[in-house]
Image (cartoon, rainbow, N blue to C red):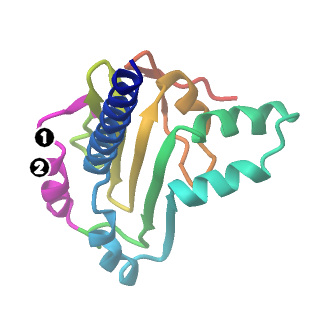
Amino acid sequence: MKVFWLVTKKAFGVWFLLATCLFSAHAQDAKIPLEKFDYLANKAEETVEVALDERLLQLAAKFLNSKDPTQAKIKEIIVGLKGVYVRVFKFTKQGEYDLKELDSLRAQLRAPGWQKIVAVRNNRGGDNVDVHLLMQNDNIAGMAIIAADPRELTLVNIVGMIDLEKLSQLQGQLGIPKFDFELSGGKSKPRNED
């Protein structure tokens, strides 16, 4: 009987290790290479770069006050994340970057598992927004947002298990910009401006 429990414990340990590795590998698929757009910083008037891996997110969570309702919500959200990566480039005039430069990124987001949930197009030179989710069974394992207009480009990549209702509360936090829509239950709706 001792041998049975010993073998069972070892088998469970191996299964747990494999499951953890598989989740980590899948979560890594959610990270997209935003750094390949860093060359745009030389053309931009203003840039923002945020690169918070899991270690830095957990460190940040330690400094959030659990008694402050806003900070407590942020802490709850970031505990399950593996990374938050943001690039924002603001240009002085139109045409300083080519929208076609985003084609390779959009192609990567058409890979299996990724699903586009929002696509906003303005054919008169306004905002164009794409929101993609990486699904793992019925869970969201990653998110990518591309918001492009003629004078500003915003790229956001969130890696890890995501609850969309809670995630919408991160807009304006951790370098994640506020968008003109809210994510609610996998659907977008106009955001109420305060």
Q: Quadrant of residue 110?
A: top left
Q: Which mark is residue 107?
A: 2
Please say if 90 is above or below 132.
below
Find residue 138 and report its horizontal and vertical position in percent. Answer: 31, 18
Q: State the quadrant of the N terminus.
A: top left
Going by the picture, which residue comes out furthest to the bottom?
Answer: 42
Q: Residue at x 32, y 29 (%)?
A: 7
Q: Please tell me whether mark 2 sits on a helix, a strand or a loop.
A: helix
Local crowd size for mark 1, using a 10 Å CA cut-off: few (<14), some (14–19), many (≥20): few
Residue type at mark 2: give it: Ala
| CB under 8 Å between discs 2 and 1 | yes
Q: Left or right of 137: which side holds 53?
A: right
Specify start and end residues of the magenta stretch as a single range.
Answer: 98-119
Magenta-colored stretch includes residue 112:
yes
Numbered badge on residue 110: 1
Q: Residue at x 60, y 23 (%)?
A: 192
Whether residue 118 can be seen here: no
Where residue 50 appears, as percent x and y from the top left, is 51, 63
